[in-house]
Image: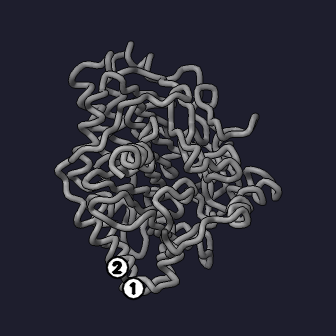
Amino acid sequence: MHGHRSRTPETERTRRWFMNRSLLLGGAAAVAAMTGCSAGSGSTASTASSSAAPGGMPSGMPGGNGMGPGATEVKYADFVGVTTDGKVVDGLYSIHSTDVSTDKVVQAAQAFLDGLTGKERKACVFEVDDDEWLAWSNVDGYQREGARMGDLTDAQRDLGYALLGAALSADGLTQTRNIMKLNAFLGDYNGGGKETLTEGHYYFTFMGTPSTTKPWGFQFEGHHVAINYFVLGDQVVMTPTFMGSEPTSATYQGEKITLFEPETEAGLAMIRSLTDAQRAQAIDSDKDKSGTDMVAGAGQDNLKLPYAGLPGSKMTAAQKRKLLDLVGVYVGYMDAGHAAVKLEEVAEHIDETYFYWLGETEDSSAFYYRVHSPVVLIEYDAQSPLAYGNESGGGNSSAGPGGGAGMMGGTPTQQHIHTIVRTPNGGDYGVDLLKLHLANDH
């Protein structure tokens, strides 16, 4: 047993307080003003639902959600994962050797924990099957558990970044760090002095004890980034992984940072590779691109999402390769060896992999796309400006120079992008692997 106490009902009410208070203060606009993050109208709600969402609550709204667990948080014991109809497809995952060592990430995790004080360590270590796994959010003001980077010493932070460096690829580490930097840029843009819009307001939590044989994992979480990293032997599950930013391009402390170009370009390459007939099936002509269309964000752990769009079975070999290239952009943010393992898993189900699109297809268009198969779910969503941008994006000027909290009514823009990667059918957080381990190997 770990020294960390389980979350109490009082703690969970405190976590929900942020979202509920936002509604009381004025609904969606209050959420935008307080968080600088999307609350979402969920234009794809007709094809997606969550067993956790209360009736009538739009996807993406507090309690419904897409920003955080809120009042609808799924417990670990009740976790099912993303499914097409509420029923998990069996036999997709197994405990096996990947021949890709996890020694470096285990060592880096242990070094980080060893560098913490006893109090700091107690605050960030949970049981391997704790509800804390599912309690992440991409909202900046959400109350989090764990070791906060901004409260650590330089040496402790360096150990934290070393852990991320061991778990992620070079591109993944750069992406994560740049999201944190643009979070700080947004704080400066809005006048500074806001604790949550800084490079330091990101938290580490650990589930279980770092081990090369026993199950464990860690979570790195804050505004616009949430990395869930589960390890069992030499197997790794790095989902859900949420990455986003507003803005996506800016100069911070003399460094020009631009995010999500690979995701944008790979999506456009995929849609443009299709014939007119294929595009007609992939592009949803019944819906317009809204201010936010993501459906599998935070708080959507038991999402029911039917397949939509063009299946891989109707693609040419070249188009299937482009689809795998697209998946590879997202999967490629984990270390190279385990990224290759995951991509091979996706390739095995390529004919069952669907590509879905909302919006226009020009270089500068704000669009949404989704890649969905039994073993991977990826969403890319260019959203309305909330705290950065110009007045043409909608909203008012209270969010900063020339900016406005555009919320759902604003025109979507590539300067505010959210992405997420999930492992459907019980794979997120390594839940299915842990069940198999406990049933057969424990």
- Measured as percent of width and height from the top left, residue 350 is found at 30, 27
Q: Is residue 200 left or right of residue 441?
A: right
- Measured as percent of width and height from the top left, residue 360 is found at 48, 31
- Do we see residue 398 in this rendering? no
- Crowding at dot 1, Cα within 10 Å, few <14 / some 14-19 / many 20+, comes out as few
Element under disc 2: helix
- Residue in the foreground of this view, choosing between 414 and 41: 41
Identity of the amino acid at label 2? Asp
- Residue in the foreground of this view, choosing between 388 and 436: 436
Marks 2/1: CA–CA distance: 6 Å
Name the residue that disc number 1 marks.
154
The total of numbered circles placed on residues is 2
Mark 2 in CB contact with mark 1 (< 8 angstroms): yes
Give the residue displayed 68% in from the left and 43% down from the top: 64
Q: From the viewer's perspective, is residue 163 above or below residue 430? A: below
- Measured as percent of width and height from the top left, residue 438 is found at 40, 49
- Residue in the foreground of this view, choosing between 409 and 353: 353
Q: Residue furthest left?
A: 99
- Do we see residue 338 in this rendering? yes
Element under disc 1: helix
Q: Is residue 253 left or right of residue 67?
A: left
Identity of the amino acid at label 1? Asp
Name the residue that disc number 2 marks.
158
